[in-house]
Amino acid sequence: MMLTIDETRYQDAHQRDCARVAALLSDGALHSRPNVADALQMTSTTTSRVVADLLDRGLLIGEAGEKSGRGRPAAKIALNPGRLGATIIHISSRSLLGVLVDLSGKVIERRSIDIPVESDGAYMAAAMRRLVVTLVGQCTPGMHHIGTSVSVSGVVNVRERKWLITSRWPNIRNLDLGAALAPVTPVVIVCRHLDAELNARTLNDTAHAHDNTLLLHWGWGIGLAYGVDGEPFMRAGEPFGEIGHWRFNLLEQRQCGCGNHGCLETAAALWALLPQLRELWPDLSEDEELVAGQLAELQLADLPEITTALSLMARSLANVCRLLFPKRIIVTGPFIANRDLWDAFETAFHAEGVMGGLELPVLVADKSSEDYAILGAVRPLLNLGLETFIRS
Ligand SMILES: [Zn+2]
């Protein structure tokens, strides 16, 4: 994984050089000292001093390379990914998935805990602490644990690290994740699952990295993330993209988990449609990945409740386009795994249009990616951990 540093955050020139070398070596390859000096335009004396310091602190590992032309050993160096570790808590349907990764983003350990639907904030906080303690216990020898990134679905205030509402656990409101995890981890970062996933997708897809991209998740809940040039559109960390709670007159008799009536989710989210769909197919799972496989095989597109959901979703998405004008929209979630439903959704979206002759954005159906969500959640934590380590 490529780490990024903010050079302006280092007043000490030596520390700044250490950070630059570590970021360069985070490509995972072996480098020679002259190659590092060249790439960063540092003198050989400075490079040697920085490399010696980082070797000493265990952040780099050295490997004796081939003899150079003049017969001197040209040792190669690489980043030691095992020096720093980070934990991530990710929400996966109605369970917590905990992951321990090293500095290269490689997964060292995974654990999961099921959280019953009736759980409250205290129960959730205790389970998260248990998960972090277990994972930290799996750190390899010499690994320093830098902190925990919590990636949540639902409505979240990232800046205040508060999980406001989640449709999976209706009794959890305003959970202070920073305070909940402070006893067991040095740093807590909170992110929106969809922001993390979109960020990692954009960084890994260089062809579209500069497109304004919208990620719409149509699943248990409904929400979206928006990235401009690979960066989240909303940087202030307040809630964003909760189109699942846009309200419609047509739905005003229906109660939503957020406390309002008439939200889009009451007609189109999996939590609202599942009871009706189970009258026809009682075995449908509430796990998004499992139900995606089940829905793919069913005759869904003609059901009246699905037709309503589909037209409301298409209109909502077209309205979002008239606000944000994305170039590309990635749609994820279990419903669109059904081919007929996806075709009908695309047709309804195209029929909506954007405005006048304006070109419609490209619509792409994809699976939700746990790997992307974890990568996107851990990257800012690793960048921060590297900075803290170098400044300490
Ligand atoms: Zn609502």
Image (cartoon, rainbow, N blue to C red):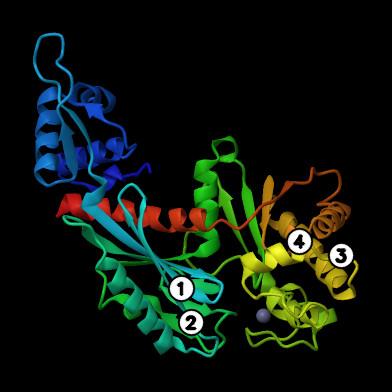
Residue type, numbered disc 2: Ile
How far apart are the alpha carbons under marks 4 and 3?
Answer: 11 Å
Q: Which residue is mark 1?
A: 96
Tell whether 4 sits left or right of 97.
left
Instruction: Report the front residue among 339 and 353.
Output: 339
Element on which disc 3 rests: loop
Q: Which residue is mark 3?
A: 301
Label 3 packing within 10 angstroms: few (<14), some (14-19), many (20+): some
**Residue 304: x and y, percent?**
90, 74
* 1 or 2: tag closer to the N-terminus: 1
Q: Is residue 391 above or below residue 96?
A: above
Q: What residue is at 73 percent from the left and 58 percent from the top?
A: 337
Q: How many marks?
A: 4
Q: Which mark is residue 115?
A: 2
How far apart are the alpha carbons under marks 3 and 1?
Answer: 32 Å
Q: What residue is at 60 percent from the left and 39 percent from the top?
A: 208
Asked if disc 4 and disc 3 are in contact, CB closer than 8 Å, the reply is no
Element on which disc 4 rests: helix
How far apart are the alpha carbons under marks 1 and 2?
Answer: 7 Å
**Residue 317: x and y, percent?**
75, 60
Q: Which residue is mark 4?
A: 296
Asked if disc 1 and disc 2 are in contact, CB closer than 8 Å, the reply is yes
* 3 or 1: tag closer to the N-terminus: 1
Element on which disc 1 rests: strand
How far apart are the alpha carbons under marks 1 and 4?
Answer: 26 Å
Label 4 packing within 10 angstroms: few (<14), some (14-19), many (20+): some
Q: Is residue 375 above or below residue 73?
A: below
Tell whether 155 sits left or right of 39.
right
